[in-house]
Image: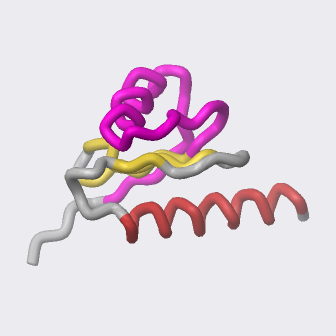
Amino acid sequence: MNYDAITIRHSTGADRKALLRLAELDEAPAPNGDALLAFVGGELRAAVPLEKGGAVADPFHLTSDVIDLLRLRARQEIERAAA
């Protein structure tokens, strides 16, 4: 079985256009502010805001596990910042 690498990183201003395109595909509002992005095989597949708001994901790919991973990482970062 072939698995693509998953890269998670914080969004930057340069990601805005890609986030808007992803949100349009998902028919959901794009995250505002800092978000965690997941790239699978080099392609943006999902985003989760670090503040309040819902995830956006590419509806043409299986992304539920990727979103779960992003939410876990976001919780870890929020807990670490609060400590």
Residue depicted at 51% across the width and 34% down the height:
30
Residue depicted at 39% across the width and 53% down the height:
7
Depth check, front residue: 8 or 68:
68
Q: Quadrant of residue 10?
A: top right
Residue depicted at 46% across the width and 40% down the height:
28
Q: Residue furthest right?
A: 83
Depth check, front residue: 23 or 68:
23
Return the x and y of residue 77 as percentages of the image width and height. 71, 58
Depth check, front residue: 31 or 2:
31
Does 12 appear above or below 9? above
Return the x and y of residue 4 as percentages of the image width and height. 21, 61
Image quadrant in which the N terminus is located: bottom left
Left or right of 83, for residue 19: left
Tell me if residue 23 is in the magenta stretch: yes
Left or right of 54, for residue 33: right
Return the x and y of residue 23 as percentages of the image width and height. 41, 36
Left or right of 13, for residue 23: left
Left or right of 78, for residue 17: left
Tell me if residue 38 is in the magenta stretch: no
Does 21 appear above or below 72? above
**Number of marks in picture:** 0
Image quadrant in which the C terminus is located: bottom right
Q: Which residues are magenta?
A: 6-35
Does 27 appear above or below 17? below
Q: Residue furthest front?
A: 27
Q: Residue furthest left?
A: 1
Does 58 appear above or below 82? above
* Colour approach in the figure: secondary structure
Return the x and y of residue 49 as percentages of the image width and height. 61, 46
